[in-house]
Image (cartoon, coloured by chain):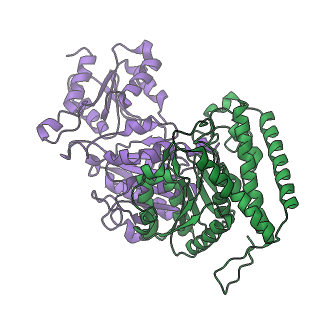
Amino acid sequence: MTLATDQSKTKVEPKTEHWMRMYRRMVMIREFEEQVNELYTRALMPGLAHLYIGQEAVAVGICEALRQDDYITSTHRGHGHCVAKGASPDRMFAELLGKEAGYCRGKGGSMHIADPATGNLGANAIVGGSAGIATGAALSSKRLGTGQVAVCFFGEGALGQGVLYEVMNLASLWKLPAIYVCENNLYTEYTHYSETTAGDILARGTAFGVQAESVDGQDVRAVYEAAHRLVERARKGEGPAFLVCNTYRYTGHHVGDINREYYRSKQEELEWKTKRDPIKNYSQWLVEQKISDESKLKEIQEEVRAEMKAAVEFAIAAPYPTVDQVDQDVYA
Amino acid sequence: MPEVATRELTFAQAVREALAEEMRRDKRVCIFGEDVAEAGTPFKVLSGLVEEFGAERVIDTPISEAGFTGMGVGAAMTGLRPVVDIMFGDFLTLTMDQMVNQAAKVHYMSGGTWKVPMVLRTTLGATRRSAAQHSQSLHAWLCHVPGLKVVMPSTPYDAKGLLKSSIRDENPVVFFEDKMMYKLKGPVPEEEYTIPLGVAEVKRKGEDITIVATSSMVQVALGAAELLEKIGLSAEVIDPRTMWPLDEKALVESVKKTSRAVVVDEGYGRYGVTGEIASVIAEGAFYSLEAPVKRMGAMHVPIPFSPSLEDVTVPTEQTVFEAARTLCGKA
C-alpha cells in the first residue's frame, strides 16, 4: 500500500485514491448486503445471513491499514470483512447460494467464507471461535519473520468467551502481531450488551498488558487512523492491540429478525441511521474537503450497484456442486 | 520389522526421538504446551528437546488448553507444523471447540483451500491412581469427528514411526500415548523409518480367535494370548494402530480366518471404539463368525481412585483370557 505518510509526524495522510477506495468499499459492503437481503426475501438463498449494514466503517477502516498478505479472521457477520479485505463479490454471492464457484465451493456458506489469496483465514460461526486461529497466525508470522499482522474480528458478544482471554494473555506474553478488533454493535443477538457485559471493556485488554483503545466505529477515518497505528506498531514487534469499535447493527441479528421492538426501539435505529451513518457522514466529509463531489459519489454508488447486480446474476446462474463432491476435502 | 540394526528404547524415548528427528528435518515443526520445555512434561517425555531446539521451538504455555490448541490450528494454517501437547487426555474436553469445530472443519469448510497440518499429542489410560480427571481414555470422542485422524501406538517402534508420519501429515492428527506405557521397552531401528497411517499390524499370529486390541491393551491381549495357548487355543492379536483411518480390511480378514473376535480398548465400551470395530467385523465377516463379537472396554463409571476399585474398571490379561476362552466354547 502506498501511503503519503509524513514520517516526521504520527499523523497519516492517505492520498485521494485511498480516501476514495474506503468510500467505494463501504458502498460495496452496503450494496452487497442489500442484495443479500433481497436474495433472502426472494427465497433464493438457502439458510440465513447476518448483515453488516451500519458497521461498514469498521471493516473498511481496519482492512485499509492491512497488507494483502496480512491475515484476518471473521465472524458470522463477516461479509463486510471479506469485501474489505478484497474478496470478489461474485464468488461471495456464489458461496452464499451454495454454488461450486463460491469461495468454499459451496461447502461453507455465508458464515464460513475463507480466501487464502486475501489472507482471509475464514469466517467463524462459533462466537470467539477464531481467536485462537488468529493468534496462531500471529505466532507463525513472528516465528517465520514475515512481518504479517493478524486481525481477529469479533463482536462484543465474544467478550463472554474465555478463549479470547487465554489468547490475549498469550499474545501479550509473546508480543505477537495480533490485533483484536471488538465491534461493539450493542446487541448480542437479541440482548443489549449491558445485560451480558460487566465492568470495563477496555480493561479486558489492559489487564493483559495489551494496548487497548476505543474508537468511533462509525467514522472510517478514525478507525483507519487507529488501525494503521496499531497495525504498524504490531508489525514492528511492539505487541498486540485490542481495539474496540463502537458501532451499530442497522438490521436484525439475521435477515429473518424483522420485529425487533421487544429488544430495541425503532427510534433508536432511526437515530443511528440518520445521525451516525458511516457512509453518509463520510460522503459529506469527502465533499467538504473537495476530495470528491456529490455527482461523483453517486456515480460510484451506481457503478457498485451494477457490479453487485452482475455478481448476483453470476451466482444465480452458477451451477451447484455435483453430489460426488460431498465427501471431497474432508482430508487434505 | 525390517532387518536393520536396532536398540531397545522406551516408549517415551521413541516419542522423543521421533520429535527430535522431525524437528531436525523440518524447521517448521515446533512444540507447545504446558511444561514442555525445561520440565520436559511431567512424564519427562520431552526432556532434552528444549536444549537442542531452543525455547523458540519448544514453547512453554500458560495453562490455557483451548487457547494454545486454537493457536496450533492457526499456526498450522499459516506455515508452522505445531505439535500441541495436552498433558492429560482428560484435558481434551477443554480443547473440544478448537479440535471439533475448528481444526477438523477448516479444510472442508474452506472448500479445500486451507490445511491444518497439526499434531495434538495427549495421553490416555487408567491404573495410575490418578482418579477420575486424570485417567480417562477419551479417544472415541475424536474418532467421531470427520476431518481428524486418530493414532494409538502400542509399542516404541510404532510410536516412533507413526508419530513421524503424523507430523508429516497434512491433516490434524490426534496422537494418544498411554501414560502407563512410557517405560515399556522395545526394539527400535537405528535407521530412519515411518509407518503409514491406516495400516493395522498383526502382533501375534493365531488360528482360533482374533483379539483386536489398541494402545496398551495390545500388551494385555498378548498376555491373554499366552494364557490361551496354555489351554490349547491359538489367538491372533491385531492392532489397528490408527483408529481413523481404520484398516477395516485387515480386521475383517483376520476374523474371516479365525471366526471369532474379542475387541479390547481402554475407552468406555458404550458408543465407543470397540462398538465401531465390532460393527466393522460383523458387517465384513458375518458369515464367518461362529460367535457374537465380544467388546471389552472401561467399565461405565468415572475412574475411581482406590486401587481396589480402579483395577477392576479396565480389561486385564485375565479378563480378556476368560472372555476369549468363553467365546471359543472352553469355559
Residue that lies at the very extreme toward the bottom in this rendered image: A8
Residue that lies at the very extreme toward the front in this rendered image: A267
Which of the two residues, B45 or A77, is positioned nearer the viewer here? Answer: A77
Residue A85: quadrant of the picture? bottom right
Q: The purple chain is which one?
A: B
Question: Where's residue A238, x and y in %?
Answer: 52, 75
Which of the two residues, A48 or A268, is positioned nearer the viewer here? Answer: A268
Question: Where's residue B262, x and y in %?
Answer: 32, 24
Instruction: Classify residue A72 as left or right of residue B193.
Output: right
Question: Where's residue B265, x and y in %?
Answer: 32, 33
Asked if residue A1 shows in the view, the reply is yes
- Residue at x 37% of width, y 52% of height: B188
- Residue at x 33% of width, y 46% of height: B89
Asked if residue B5 shows in the view, the reply is no
From the image, which quarter does the C terminus of chain B lie in?
top left
Which of the two residues, B280 or A126, is positioned nearer the viewer here? Answer: A126
**Height in image: A165 above or below B97?**
below
Residue B59: quadrant of the picture? bottom left
Question: Where's residue A33, x and y in %?
Answer: 70, 45
Instruction: Classify residue A91 as left or right of residue A276.
Output: right
- Residue at x 25% of width, y 45% of height: B133
Q: Chain A is drawn in which colour?
A: green
From the image, which quarter does the N terminus of chain B lie in?
top left
